[in-house]
Amino acid sequence: MLNSQLANPLQDLAKGIRDREGVVADELLGLLRKIAARGPVLAELAADTAVGRTLETLLGIPINSSRQPDYKGIELKAFRQSKGNRKNLFAQVADWDRSKFKSSAEILEAFGYQRGEDLKLYCTVSTLAPNSQGLSLKVNSDERLLLEISKEASIGGFATWTLSKLHERLLEKHNETFWIAAESIREDGNEYLHYTKVQHTRKPIVSQFDLLVEQGIITMDHLIKRTLTGKTVEKGPLFKIKPNSVGLLFPPSRTHSLL
């Protein structure tokens, strides 16, 4: 009797939260179906980011750099169905207090290359093998760390993330996510996007994150640049997952056609 008296309020609270979450998901799904019904729409700009930017504009979401989910607690991840690119999970700089290098600027100084007037480091880093800059990742399970390592012995490990922080960012960003596929159509030099399908995921399995990094399925991209003004900009590091591997990071999900 006591157990049932305690359980019922908790069950009612959990049900109320689930019901509210379901209302937002259904609302967003309805908006996306209205957008899909318009057919292909002109991309807002000529760039890889157009697929996400155009969708946000259609949904009336202002462009910002917030770390929070996009639509009432639901993260939106739009992608071109045909390109097969890796999907962005989240951005997270290293824990500089734990790292040998103390900033993205130091990483750029050590490994950057000149492109026109800019010094850049745009590269993908994984656990599988060093990239062309000699950089790779390593999971230290004993100390619960992710390390970025140079093959130059004089440098060695230079950037460190705690796995707990990466798990925190994953949960923060992807508590609930709509992965939205778009068909890309080229016509008269313009791109048109037709949003056609949604994969709806919830509650990532954080223990899977470490395994997928170790297997090279989750990788990290540096996007560091210094212009003539001397300002260093880091748009990442971006943690990304290989296409068709999203299901390995989440419990069974639902897929909805928008057409």
Image: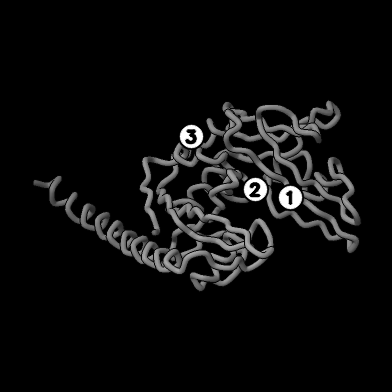
* In this rendering, position of residue 70 left or right of residue 37: right
Q: Earlier in the sequence, mark 1 or mark 3?
A: 3
User: Residue 198 appears at what percent x and percent y?
Assistant: 43, 53
* In this rendering, position of residue 154 left or right of residue 36: right
Residue farthest toward the front in the current orientation of the protein: 188
Question: Does residue 190 lie above or below 244 as drawn?
Answer: below
Residue at 45% across, 53% down? 177
* In this rendering, position of residue 183 left or right of residue 19: right
Residue at 76% across, 46% down? 122
Residue at 44% across, 61% down? 73
Residue at 80% across, 44% down? 107
**Does dot 1 land on a helix, a strand or a loop?**
strand
Question: Does residue 15 lie above or below 3 as drawn?
Answer: below
**Does dot 3 land on a helix, a strand or a loop?**
helix
User: Residue 109 appears at what percent x and percent y?
Assistant: 87, 45
Residue that numbered label 3 is attached to: 208
Q: How far is mark 2 from mark 3, CA to CA? A: 18 Å
Residue that numbered label 2 is attached to: 238
- Name the amino acid, label 2: Leu
Residue that numbered label 1 is attached to: 223
Question: Does residue 139 lie above or below 39 as drawn?
Answer: above
Q: Earlier in the sequence, mark 2 or mark 1?
A: 1
Q: Nearer the viewer, residue 164 or 47?
A: 47
In the picture, which quadrant includes the C terminus?
bottom left
Is the residue under label 1 in contact with that under label 2 (CB below 8 Å)?
A: yes
